[in-house]
Amino acid sequence: MLTIENARIEMGDFTLSADLQVPEGKRVAVLGPSGAGKSTLLAMIAGFQPLTSGVIRWKGGTMPDDPADRPISMVFQDNNLFPHLTVAQNVGLGVRPDLRLTPDDKRRVDAALERVGLTGKGDRKPAQLSGGQIARVALARVLLRHRPLLLLDEPFGALGPALRAEMLELVGELTAETGATLLMVSHNPEDARLLSDEVVLVEGGQVHAPVPTAQIFDDPPDALREYLGS
Amino acid sequence: MSRSGRIARPIWVSHWPGLLAVALLVVLVFGTLLAVALRADGGRGLGPADWAAIRFTLWQAAVSAGVSVVLAIPVARALARRDFPGRQALVTLLGAPFILPIIVAVLGLIAVFGRTGIVSAALGLVGVEPISVYGYHGVILAHVFFNLPLATRLILQGWLSIPAERFRLAASLGMGPRDIARTLERPVLREVIPGAFLVIFLICLTSFAVALALGGGPRATTVELAIYEAFKFDFDLGRAALLALIQFAMGIGAALIAFKIAMPGNMGTGLDRAVQRWDDSGGQRIMDVVAITLASLFLLLPLTMVVIDGLPGLLTLPQSVFQAAIRSLMVAFGSAFLTLALALPIAALVVQRGAWLAEGLGYLTIAASPLVVGTGLFLILFPFVKPSDLALPVTALVNAAMSLPFALRALVPALNSVERDYGALADGLGLHGLTRLRLLWLPRLRRPIGFALGLAAALSMGDLGVIAMFADPQGVTLPLQLYRLMGSYRMDDAAAAAVLLLGLSLLLFWIFDRGGRVNADD
């Protein structure tokens, strides 16, 4: 269970409050207008954005301060790969951040690349990859990090519709295999329908409690109705 | 998420190396100052010679800064509104004096403006007495040589900051050159010129090598030169210390004034395009051609003369010159890596703690004179070791401290953008401490690191300051050896040594800067 208790962030005239619970293994879409604080919510869970007040717990225990020690893998909007490292090195960071990999570690890297459909691409640099391939490399690293909580900050936003559906399907498979809990920011309600069990709405400085996906689209609350424009 | 120009998120890298580097610098500047203050001999007060030195230091700095800025205005104006083949090369050349060894330029100026130089020879043809480059006018001439390019770049930057649309608007309103000057150009100049004047004033205030080579005597001795003479000729440590205190007070005073006035950054880019204008006339064209031609001649002729005079003697240089060159290379490499070892942790601290720290350190090292630091180090070391034994390490350390503001100016913005783009990713993956340095910072900062290393190495290679106080005749560096050759009127050897020094300085800069560029992933 991911628990966010009376969490609050204040940055100048921007504020965000959250108080909610996400059961383990759930897939949650985070929807809301731009600038509402969807990314800030993820940054606060991941430990990049210090809380002004409140607390975040995982399985009842408080989260460590260091983002790397949290039970979390995160994929960002962009800059998910270091451009000076090869694909295999970028994935290898998920095994050991100092990249001192044993032959066994390297086999695990190759296996992860194979799982996301990038067999044999390990020696390439990110500049030689397409947008979809870059997203796959980031997901291969998520596999090796093997953390119970996966945060996606709209990593497929720049991809075309077909490719995005493909990536969402891959994310669905991977989370099903690993049993990871997923929080996924999106601009697109369609993404939520495709993949998520529940939807969290962020608007007006407030993170609303999760609502089952089917229910929220059948009977959208006013804020979501306004956002969807329907 | 950074709303105040620095990274809001904590970076998982220790503060300690940065704090240690800052502490080292503060101790270097204020510890030596304390040593100086304890030793200063205030008993006799300031003699007439000391007052003359203070007056001359302030006066020459003001005149040098004034002349540089006034002459720079027409050159910057010409560069701002003319596009011509070689414009880019000229703009690049304007940055070159920065890494040019002062003593080499002095030799070139003597070859052009000295008693047997080409200007005197030309004057002789029409029956005018030859001119001399020694004395106050030589000091000012050399300072203008070094700072006219800097002033030109700063003013050009201001000029090119006027949006091109304004000139189109002015043209559509039918404004003539006078109207444009009044409404567009003078407001910008009024903003840029005080800063440019102050930067150059500060630089000239602590200039030592120029005064050593061209000044001297009752009418052209700066405080720094007086410190050196009290040291070297009279071995009057009390008086040297007293003068060092005065020098520091002057530097701090100027730095405090500089704080009040917006200081321009001189690493500006985007000087590569001239602005199109519609108020051109024949008279303006002639003025611009004259300004650019004279400025180019003024900058290129002295260096050309050094190369012409020096190349033939390069292979027959005495062994001692090559030994001095090897010592200088060691100092330059040591200083370059010391600069980086100080700058990188401080840059990390600045990125986390805010830019005031970098600016404060910048002002501190500009205001602190190398000679004052040198005097303090001498006083501290003198009771324990023979100072000449430590001449080279001390020179490398002082040079590194003086290069630091420039290294920070290259590194801090680059590190800021690396952390902005990849910091969260690195934090999330647990790239902490040395792992972050190895896998993220060093590879992503190759260009600015190469530039900073090149700059520090070239500056140290050509430096003639602290080494003059510390070295014994067997342990000199190349610039000091060159100065000694000039002092004993072996001008052919001096010119050849100057070519060697010039070549090595430019080569060092080029190698490091180049090393940061090749195979860099973007």
Image: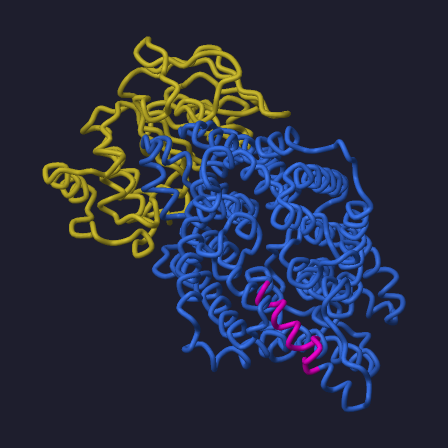
Chain colours: A yellow, B blue
Most extreme residue toward the top is A60
Residue B487 quadrant: bottom right
**Residue B385, horizontal then vertical, whole percent:** 45, 37
**Is residue B112 shown in magenta?**
yes
Kindly identify the residue that appears in the image at 81 percent across and 61 percent down.
B185
Magenta span: helix, strand or loop, mainly? helix
Give the residue displayed 70% in from the left and 71% down from the top. Answer: B79
**Is A69 drawn above or below residue A3 in the view shown?**
below
Residue B40 falls in which quadrant of the image? top right
Is residue A228 visible to us here?
A: no
Residue at screen point 38% across, 59% down: B515
Q: Is residue B321 above or below residue B401?
A: below
Percent x, y for residue B29? 59, 36
Q: Is residue B278 magenta?
A: no
Which of these two is toward me, B467 or B3? B467
Residue at the bottom extreme, as displayed: B125
Would you say B193 lies left or right of B23 here?
Answer: right
Quarter containing the C terminus of chain B: bottom left
Please name whichever residue, B19 or A14, is drawn nearer the observer in this view of the structure. Answer: B19
In magenta, the rendered stretch is B103-118
Q: Is residue B76 visible?
A: yes
Q: Which quadrant of the structure image shows residue A213? A: top left
For residue B100, above or below residue B393: below
